[in-house]
Image (cartoon, helix red, strand yellow):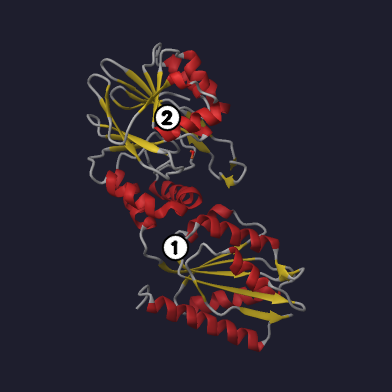
Amino acid sequence: MKTRELRPNVYSIGAIDWDSRLFDRLIPLPDGTSYNAYVVRGSEKTVLFDTVDPAETSVLLGNLARLGIDKLDYVVSHHGEQDHSGSLPDILLMYPGAKLVTNPKCKQMLIDLLDIEQSKFVTVEDGQELSLGDKTLRFLYTPWVHWPETMSTYVIEDKILFSCDFFGAHLATSSLFVDDEGAVYEAAKRYYAEIMMPFRKQIRANLAKLNELDIEVIAPSHGPAHDKPAFIMDAYEDWVSDSVKNKVVVPYVSMHGSTGEMISHFVEALMDRDIAVRQFELSTVDLGKLAIDLVDAATIVIGSPTVLAGAHPAAVYAAFMANAIRPKAKFASIIGSFGWGGKTVEQLTGLMSNLKVELLEPVLTKGAPREAAFVALDRLADEVLAKHKQAGIVN
Ligand code: FEO
């Protein structure tokens, strides 16, 4: 990849990964990703911020050579996860005089994960500064974006924040800065939903800390940089707030059509009541899309048939995932068809114990749905609307 200049003597030198479609063998990457690393040249010292995924090490080393970097004084590691730290051993071999600057928690992670020698490290405290000559780095602890050790660096003179995963997006693009706000908003919201949403309250504290800074550029470690930081900071403020939208997320799976028929009726009933709905068929869904809508939906209603006395495995997976990423939804319910009995409701509600939701009366029907089931689904839609009104989401 080309090296590109964000500001005088500040370069983006990471790798664009256009082709990957799965991260951590878990997270879909519909638009690829990038592993951003940055070089800042001060009048006296040169620093590298983070590295790249080990598979892309040759790209990083090539870019350092292309920029003519024959000496690195410091390598700052903001986060221990290997998509940013994985090339550190090669970088430290190539630049043996470089000191590895990080916080004590991240230091231990890098030792545990990558066997980096103790003697390589310099640890920094929250707020500590380091001079490069005409540029000054200020290290800021920003825990839980995405692991407990994550931190950011603010370059005081350039007003640039290097934020690592924070404000990032899995998006492969040739643009150095955001040029398609719609695409970046969706990718950033997906990224937030998948890895940061469980730490919403801690992220709120990090945002408050950053609001004290005069930031002109945010340079994250995935996706394009932000030269209009308010765009992404305002989006985060909304996502981490306690407010939810007049929206119901309906992940469902149906084996022979009965649960599907119930879901269709229920979704139309919600639409008749001017409630936004997002319906996701779970055997084919991109779970990232589902996660995006879980960021701000007021209500989750899972549709599942009963299989072998419990919920369909696709519904179990969706409930497990929702429980793990901890959306701020306030209400939940379950819809489904069964043949002769089972524990679908108990199983799905048991899987969502992390969610602070009020359970609205589920609608389960024996066999194909008939009049009584449709009446019960209309009653559930009425209850959703009433709850959204009580919560002040709609008038
Ligand atoms: Fe991009 Fe948590 O690593």
Q: CA distance from mark 2 to mark 1?
A: 31 Å
Residue 240, position as x, y percentages in the image: 38, 56
| Residue that label 1 marks | 328
Residue drawn at x 49%, y 35% is 34
Q: Residue at x 42, y 76 (%)?
A: 388
Q: Amino acid at mark 1?
A: Lys
Asked whether the viewer can see residue 163, the reply is no
Circle 2/circle 1 CB separation < 8 Å: no
Give the residue at the far top of this rendering.
70
Which quadrant of the figure contains the C terminus? bottom left
Counting labels gives 2
Q: Where residue 390 sits in the image (x, y, percent)?
A: 38, 79
Query: In the figure, is residue 382 to the left or right of 393?
Result: right
Work out whether mark 2 precedes mark 1 in sequence or the reverse, and give the earlier one. Answer: 2
The residue that disc 2 covers is 77
Q: Residue at x 59, y 37 (%)?
A: 20
Amino acid carrying label 2: it is Ser
Packing grade of label 2 (10 A; few <14, some 14-19, many >=20) is: many
Q: Nearer the viewer, residue 351 or 383?
A: 351
Q: Secondary structure at mark 1?
A: loop
Instruction: Report whether residue 259 is seen.
Output: yes
Left or right? Give the position of 166 relative to 35. Answer: left
* Residue 275, above or below 140: below
- Neighbourhood count class around disc 1 (C-alpha, 10 Å): few under 14, some 14–19, many 20 upward: many
Depth check: give the residue in front, 356 or 219.
356
